Image (cartoon, helix red, strand yellow):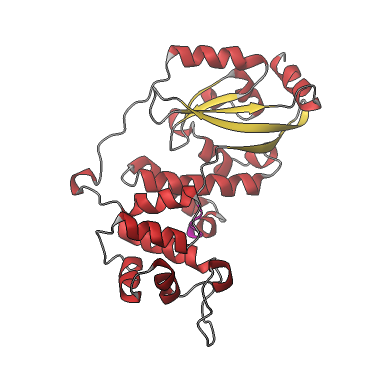
Amino acid sequence: MDGNAELGDFLRARRARLSPEQAGAAPNGGVRRVPGLRREEVAHLAGVSADYYTRLEQGRHPNVSESVLAAVARALRLDGVERDHLFELARPRAEAARGGGPPDVQRVRPEVHRMLEVLNGVSPAIVVNHRKDVLAANLLARALIADFEALPYRRRNLARFILLDPAAREVYADWEEIAQELVANLRLSCGRHPDDRLLNELVGEFMVKVPEFGAWWDDHRVRECAYGPQRLRHPAVGEVALHHETLAFPADQDQTVCLYTAGPGSDSERALRLLAGA
């Protein structure tokens, strides 16, 4: 990924979604040929010259101060995740880091495996990294979503399952919404790990094989996917309404556990218990 190009694309996508009224800018008369704010309107709101902001969007301003980035973030009404993403994209990158070496082999600690086993009776749980590689999954997650351990090593990836496996469209009742959130999360990961060869290859594969992916990717949405509702379907127990929560392991960088819980006493909780006992 070219950091300067990514920064410019992100800024253009974010200003295109804002009208002058939403941004609190005085409309700059005349016929508007593009949706959203004009460059000079963003520059005015951010307190910088139009030429400076234009060079920023065109990737011709490699060293941007944090105060300017903060002003641009305010002008574009970025939320916290988008603001962090902007700072990541604008951060100078060491030339030696480009290309990167082979990815580290990631291991899940025995204590984490035991935690997944304890959760087996009540909560599907999956451990993933920033690429959504599935590093571990308990039996209930493998029964409800997919048996990742039965797949070849390179295919044990939650994003690959959701976007490429036709079965995922049956598993996720709201597949398109889940898929778009996943793409927004991959966008965020690419900003944080721009030189990750495997991540970039994964995005390239999705661009070729998933018809919807290109439009979603070009939207430049970024999202943490930290929590939220999900509806999943299983042929044996039917549809279950679950809450998804992502928790980080402070001692294990780049590993998070995705937990799925059902409401106490709900039909979905009973369905999970039936599935766990199957």
Using the rendered image of the protein, determine whether residue 201 is visible from the camera's viewpoint.
Answer: no
The answer to which of 3 and 15 lies nearer the viewer is 15
- Residue at x 74% of width, y 27% of height: 263
On screen, residue 133 versus residue 49, left or right, reads right
Q: What residue is drawn where x is 34% and y is 72%?
A: 54
Q: How many marks?
A: 0
- Quarter-of-image position of residue 45: bottom left
Indicate whether 188 appears above or below 136.
below
Residue 121: x %, y % from top left: 67, 14
Task: Examine the rendered structure and indicate whether residue 192 appears above or below residue 15.
Answer: above
Compared to residue 270, the image places residue 31 above or below, namely: below
Locate the C terminus and report the quarter of the image it occupies.
top right
Q: Magenta segment range?
A: 217-221
Q: Position of residue 251 (x, y in %)?
A: 39, 22
Q: Check residue 220 for magenta coloring.
A: yes
242 vs 134, left or right, is right
Residue 13 coordinates in the image, percent (x, y): 48, 64
